C-alpha cells in the first residue's frame, strides 16, 4: 500500500500549499487595501486643494467651471475606489474564514491520523501474538526434511536413467524395448510428480519467508474510511488462514513423498532384474537421457496445462466443469487455485464463470480474477469486466484492473 501512503502525504502537502497560497492572497489584499486607502487620502487632499483654489479664483468663471468638473470626476473616482475597497475587504473576510476552516480541518485530520496509527499498532501487536515464531520454525523444519527427501528422489531418478542407458548400449530385443518404453514413461511421470512436489515446497518456503519477514503495517489514506479499515482486517485474517492451510499441505506432501519413494524403489528393482536376465540386441528405439531439474514456483501450473492438453475432449470438459464448480467453494484458497488453472483455459464458459466472481466477498479472490482476465484474448467482454473492477472497494484490485485496461 505504498501508493496509498504517498497519496496521504501528497494530500497533506497539497493542504499546506493551499494554506500558503491563501496566506499570500490575504497579504496581497491587505497591501491592496493600504494602497487604496492611500489613494483615497490623496484624492481627498487634491479635492481640498481645489476647493481652496476655487475660493481664490472667483473672478475666473471659466476656471471655476473646469474646476467643478474636475472635482466632480474626482469625487466619482473616490466613490469608485471606496466601493472597490469594500469589495476587497469582503473578499479578505471570506479568505480569512476559509483559512480558519482549513486550519480546523487539518487539526481534525492530524487527530484522525494519530488515532488510526494507534489502532494499527494494536492490530500489529495482536497479529504478532496470534502467530508465534515457533509455528514458523516447525514449518521450516518440515520443509527442510521434504527437501532432503526430494534430493534422494533425484539420485534415484539419475540411477534409473543410468540403467536405461546401460540397457540401450546392450541393444536389448524388441520385447525389452517395449517394456523399457513403459518404464521410461513411468519414470517421466514420477519425475513430473517430483517436480510438482518441489514446486509446492518452493511455494511454501517463499510464503513462510514472506510471513516471517512481513514488515509492520503502515498507515494509508484509505484507512480514513471504515470500509478500508475492515478491508485491512480481512487481509490480516487471510494471512492467518494461509498459515494453517500451509500446515495441511505439508502433511499431504509427506504422504506423497513416501508413496513416490516406494514406487521409485520398485521400478528400480524391476529394471535391474530385466537388465541381468536379457542379453538381446536392438537398434530400433532411441531415447533421450532423463535428468532432474529443480522446478520453479510455477512449474505445477505448467504440468497441469500439459496434462490438460493430453486429455480426451470428454475428460477436458469434465475437468473444466469440476473447476468451475470449485469457484463457488466456501474456502477462498480453493477458489483461488481454480482461478489460476482456469486462467489458461480461454473459453466462453470459463469467462462467464469468472464474471460471477466480480462481487466475491474476498478481495484476494477478486484480485486473482483480474489477473486471470489479463491472460484472455482482448475482447469487449473482458474489457467490460475490467471496467467493473475499477469500482471495486479494494484499491489494489482497482489499480491492477486499471493497469490492464491501459493495454486493451
Image: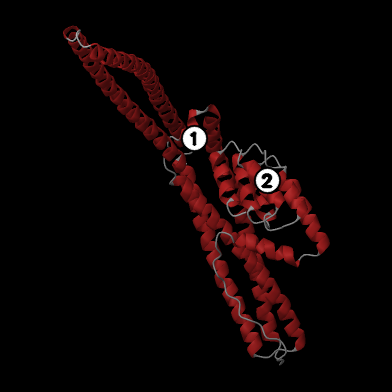
Near-viewer residue (140 or 207): 207
Work out which residue is located at the far right of the displayed protein and give it. 314
The dot on residue 385 is 2
Q: How is the image coloured?
A: secondary structure
Rendered location of residue 124, percent (x, y): 44, 34
The spot of residue 403 in percent (x, y) is: 56, 50
User: Which residue matches tag 1?
Assistant: 130
Q: Earlier in the sequence, mark 2 or mark 1?
A: 1
Q: In screen coordinates, is 73 left or right of 286? A: left
Res. 151 in view:
yes
Mark in the foreground, 2 or 1: 2
Q: Residue at x 45, y 46 (%)?
A: 212
**Residue 85, percent across and down?**
33, 17
Disc 2 is placed on an element classified as helix
Q: Position of residue 16 (x, y in %)?
A: 35, 31
Mark 1 crowdedness (10 Å alpha carbons): few <14, some 14-19, many ≥20 = few
Q: Nearer the viewer, residue 26 or 112?
A: 26
Q: Is residue 272 above or below residue 322?
A: below
Q: Residues within 10 Å of mark 2 (few under 14, many from 20)?
A: some
The reply to whether residue 332 is visible in this rendering is: no
Q: Please, is residue 96 above or below residue 279 in the view? A: above
Amino acid at each position: 500500500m505504498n501508493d496509498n501512503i504517498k497519496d496521504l502525504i501528497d494530500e497533506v502537502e497539497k493542504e499546506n500549499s493551499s494554506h500558503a497560497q491563501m496566506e499570500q492572497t490575504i497579504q496581497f489584499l491587505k497591501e491592496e487595501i493600504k494602497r487604496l486607502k492611500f489613494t483615497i487620502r490623496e484624492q481627498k487632499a487634491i479635492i481640498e486643494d481645489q476647493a481652496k483654489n476655487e475660493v481664490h479664483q472667483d473672478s475666473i468663471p471659466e476656471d471655476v467651471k473646469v474646476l467643478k468638473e474636475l472635482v466632480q470626476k474626482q469625487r466619482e473616482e473616490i466613490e469608485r475606489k471606496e466601493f472597490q475597497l469594500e469589495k476587497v475587504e469582503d473578499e479578505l473576510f471570506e479568505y480569512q474564514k476559509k483559512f480558519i476552516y482549513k486550519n480546523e480541518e487539518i487539526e481534525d485530520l492530524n487527530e484522525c491520523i494519530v488515532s488510526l496509527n494507534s489502532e494499527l499498532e494494536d492490530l500489529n501487536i495482536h497479529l504478532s501474538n496470534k502467530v508465534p515464531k515457533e509455528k514458523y520454525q516447525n514449518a521450516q523444519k518440515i520443509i527442510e526434511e521434504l527437501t532432503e527427501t526430494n534430493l534422494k528422489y533425484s539420485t534415484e531418478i539419475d540411477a534409473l536413467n543410468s540403467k536405461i542407458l546401460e540397457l540401450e548400449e546392450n541393444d536389448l530385443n524388441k520385447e525389452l524395448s517395449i517394456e523399457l518404453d513403459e518404464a521410461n514413461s513411468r519414470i517421466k511421470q514420477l519425475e513430473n510428480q517430483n517436480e510438482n512436489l518441489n514446486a509446492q515446497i518452493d511455494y511454501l518456503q517463499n510464503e513462510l519467508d514472506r510471513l516471517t519477514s512481513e514488515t509492520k503495517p503502515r498507515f494509508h489514506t484509505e484507512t480514513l474510511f471504515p470500509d478500508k479499515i475492515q478491508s485491512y482486517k480481512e487481509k490480516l485474517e487471510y494471512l492467518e488462514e494461509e498459515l494453517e492451510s500451509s500446515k495441511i499441505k505439508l502433511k499431504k506432501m509427506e504422504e506423497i513423498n513416501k508413496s513416490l519413494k516406494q514406487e521409485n524403489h520398485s521400478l528400480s528393482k524391476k529394471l535391474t532384474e530385466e537388465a541381468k536376465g536379457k542379453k538381446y540386441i536392438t537398434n530400433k528405439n532411441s531415447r533421450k537421457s532423463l535428468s532432474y531439474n529443480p522446478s520453479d514456483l510455477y512449474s505445477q501450473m505448467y504440468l497441469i496445462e500439459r496434462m490438460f492438453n493430453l486429455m480426451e475432449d470428454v475428460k477436458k470438459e469434465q475437468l473444466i466443469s469440476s473447476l468451475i464448480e470449485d469457484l463457488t467453494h466456501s474456502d477462498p484458497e480453493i477458489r483461488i487455485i481454480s482461478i489460476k488453472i482456469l486462467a489458461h483455459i480461454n473459453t466462453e464458459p470459463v469467462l462467464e464463470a469468472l464474471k460471477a466472481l466480480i462481487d466475491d466477498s474476498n478481495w484476494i479472490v477478486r484480485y486473482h480474477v483480474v489477473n486471470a482476465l489479463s491472460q484472455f484474448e482482448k475482447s469487449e467482454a473482458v474489457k467490460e469486466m475490467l471496467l467493473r473492477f475499477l469500482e471495486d472497494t479494494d484499491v489494489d484490485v482497482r489499480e491492477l484492473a486499471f493497469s490492464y485496461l491501459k493495454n486493451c
